[in-house]
Image (tube, helix red, strand yellow):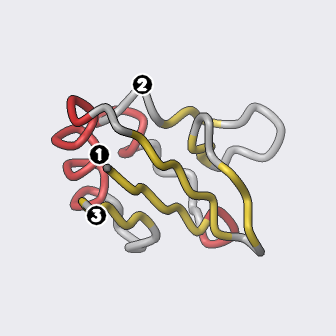
Amino acid sequence: MVVVTLQRDKCIGCNYCVEMAPGQFQMSKKDGKTVLLKSVDTRGFHTLKSHDYTILEACELAEKACPVNIISVKET
């Protein structure tokens, strides 16, 4: 399983995650911060759990590109 976590409150809206993984991330028109699609919000941590391993590489690129290190990608 691929687990992607986003600390949305700390997002600076740079858009790198959307460029690297547009299928998982999108910029909010409301506040200019990123949204982790199909995620569950638990106290500011937005988490996506997926059995689709095809998203792993793109999400890892987004994690590395994030200048404020608010994206975490793990395989379980």
Image point (22%, 52%), residue name: 60
The residue indicated by pointer 1 is 59
Mark 3 Cα-neighbour bin, 10 Å: few <14, some 14–19, many ≥20: few
Numbered badge on residue 23: 2
Q: Cα distance, mark 2 to mark 1?
A: 9 Å
Kind of residue at badge 2: Gly
Q: Cα distance, mark 1 to mark 3?
A: 10 Å
Q: Is residue 37 left or right of residue 73?
A: right
Assign a secondary structure to mark 1. helix
Q: Return the residue nearer the eye: 24 or 51.
A: 51
What is the quadrant of residue 54 in the picture?
top left
Q: Position of residue 15 (x, y in %)?
A: 46, 42
Mark 2 Cα-neighbour bin, 10 Å: few <14, some 14–19, many ≥20: few
Q: Position of residue 43 (x, y in %)?
A: 77, 75
In the image as oriented, which residue stretches furthest toward the left?
Answer: 57
Kind of residue at badge 3: Lys
Q: Cα distance, mark 2 to mark 3?
A: 17 Å
Task: Name the quarter where the C terminus is drawn.
Answer: bottom left
**In terms of sequence position, does the residue under pointer 1 or pointer 3 come before the other?**
1
Image point (47%, 50%), residue name: 14
Q: Is residue 21 left or right of residue 13?
A: left
The residue indicated by pointer 3 is 74
**In terms of sequence position, does the residue under pointer 2 or pointer 3 come before the other?**
2
In the image, residue 23 sits, relative to residue 10, either above or below, namely above
Assign a secondary structure to mark 2. loop
Q: Position of residue 47 (x, y in %)?
A: 56, 57
Image point (22%, 61%), residue name: 64
